Amino acid sequence: MPDDDSRLFRLLVQSVQDYAIFRLSPEGIVQTWNAGAEKVKGYSASEIVGRSFETFYTESDRAAGRPKVLLESARVHGRVEDEGWRVRKDGSLFWADVVITALFEAGELVGYAKVTRDLTERRRMEEQRSLRLAAERVAERLGRLQTVTAALAAASRPEEVAEMLANVGLAALGGAAAAIAVPMAEHDILQVVSATGYDPATVDLNRRVRRNQPNLLSEAWRRGEPVFVPSRERLASIYPRLARMADQSVYEAWAAIPLTIERRVVAVMAISYAEPHAFDDDERNLMLALADVAAQAIDRAELFDAETRNRAQAEAFVAAQDEFLSIASHELRTPVAAVKATAQLTQRSIQKGTLDMARLDRHLETISRAADRLGALVEDLLDVSRLRTGRLELRRQHVDCGLLVEEVVERYRVQLDDRPEYTLLLTAPDRPLYVEADPSRLEQVLDNLLSNAVKYSPAGGEIAVVLDSERNGVRVSVTDEGIGLPTGQSEAIFEPFGRASNAATQQIPGLGLGLSICKQLIEAHGGLIWAASAGERRGTTVGFWLPSPRPSATGSLPDQ
């Protein structure tokens, strides 16, 4: 009966078609061969029995000693499983699933049983499935990227791009919250310009982030590379600087990516996730691609924004220049016409013999005033040219600002003697207030501010000049009760050819150069100038500040 069982078992093994089942000697020599082995490997029994089983391995596996390693592993552990490429008789390769079992008799190794199955078709199907899934992931990722790209293309301003990126980018990346921050021009600071999903109070607290601050955005900015935190538990080990975030944040995973154009960080995008997130290669590649698209969109929007501003400035300059030419021609024509008319009157009086000394004095005074007006206009134009070309020289010296202001104010009091509708007041401390300045240019500024106070107060009123020390310097202000300034025009009046809109409406003459010259002169002295008004018909205050001279080594001011 046992002989019958052995015969039937051998018959069973010989008849199996789908598995190569054969025995090896302890040295790996093929000793038996079944029909399945011939089908799988292509050898007949007479061709392969007596040869080494290394015949079935690729040249690289044989060179690496893999067949011997597998036999040794089977001997030590009783069996070994392996998958890999094997070689058929015709040289073609097939993907094999192999089990080698060590055979022992009375504790002595007598050989190995080897079972091989051809899994080439299954492997091919798995590869096709993997390729199909990969293609589907790529298509889905490209779809999300195209959605973001289309949305960003519709935004024309940097803040619109940031807002769109925070919302559309968040949806594309499947996060719970997103924030976009841009570098500020000063102090190494990131400013959050758009956020969605975060608590508003938290956003307000972290609106401005310094580069060295332990913050997700600043970490990506400081490193200049993406930051990926897959889980709260791994935060401290990956980014120790951000360890506190695990206790402070309600989220479980984070990513932050710098958006760069030619190594320049134009923004940083942060995404927070409600659950741990693996950030596999596909996800990271999508984020990096989205960051590239977003960086280009921000750069494009910045260029468009700059172009729009430059065009608006150029148009405003052309308009101001046209207005200047119109006003200048009018302003120049007026004194020229006065000189010409007075000269003609004088000439006719001489011809008629009616010119007396009183009339001649009046004519000469008219011509003198017109000449002064022409001289002032030409000097203003020359000052503008000198300031723009950097050819204006300041002859600085130690000046008692109080004494200079008092002299200018006194001169104006004399000029206003015949105009009782004006009251000129001066408030100044009873002590010297020194500045390092060009006295002629400082007098020019004061003269301009006082003449403006008179000119823009056609109905008269009080003109108050206040002088005092302030913040290691000297502050001078001139306040009138005139036409005032429309809302939002307190800076425009310091631009070249800049005039308040109500000045032109009320036909008050002027080129719009005086305050522009004053601003450049004061700033050339290291000072500040400003204007303030409560509104139209409520007067104007124009003031400036100049720094005090630095004390000498003895603690006193020079020449004091």
Image: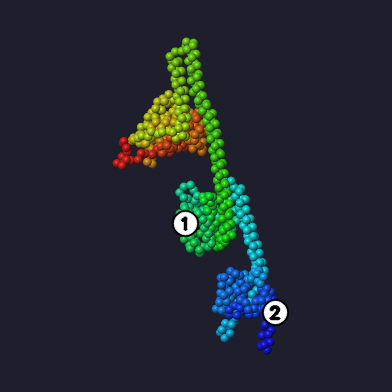
Residue 458 in the image, given as x and y percentages of width and height: 48, 28
Task: Report the mark closest to the observer, 2 or 1.
Answer: 2
Residue 468 in the image, given as x and y percentages of width and height: 38, 37
Q: Specify whether residue 36 is in view.
A: no
Calculate the distance from the C-alpha at mark 2 to the C-alpha at mark 1. Answer: 71 Å
- The relative height of residue 72 versus residue 244 in the rendered view (above or below) is below
Q: Which of the labelled discs sits on residue 88, or is there none?
A: none
Q: Residue furthest bottom?
A: 1
Label 2, residues with CA under 10 Å away: few <14, some 14-19, many ≥20: few
453 and 548: which is toward the camera: 548
Q: Residue at x 56, y 84 (%)?
A: 107
- The relative height of residue 216 versus residue 531 in the rendered view (above or below) is below
- The relative height of residue 85 versus residue 13 in the rendered view (above or below) is above
Q: Residue at x 52, y 26 (%)?
A: 330
Question: For the residue labelled by badge 1, is the local secondary structure a helix, a strand or a loop?
Answer: loop
Q: Which of the labelled discs sits on residue 15, or is there none?
A: 2
Q: Quadrant of the C terminus?
A: top left
Residue with the mark numbered 1? 214
Q: In which quarter of the image is the N terminus?
A: bottom right
536 and 478: which is toward the camera: 478
Label 1, residues with CA under 10 Å away: few <14, some 14-19, many ≥20: some
The quarter holding residue 66 reads: bottom right
Q: Which amino acid does label 2 sit on?
A: Ser
Q: Specify whether residue 310 is in view.
A: yes
Q: In the figure, is residue 79 to the left or right of 339?
A: right
Q: Which residue lies furthest to the left in this view?
A: 554
Question: For the residue labelled by badge 2, is the local secondary structure a helix, a strand or a loop?
Answer: helix
Give whichever of discs 2 and 1 has the lower sequence position: 2
Q: Which amino acid does label 1 sit on?
A: Pro
Q: Which colour scheme is used?
A: rainbow
Residue 439 in the image, given as x and y percentages of width and height: 38, 32
The quarter holding residue 432 reads: top left
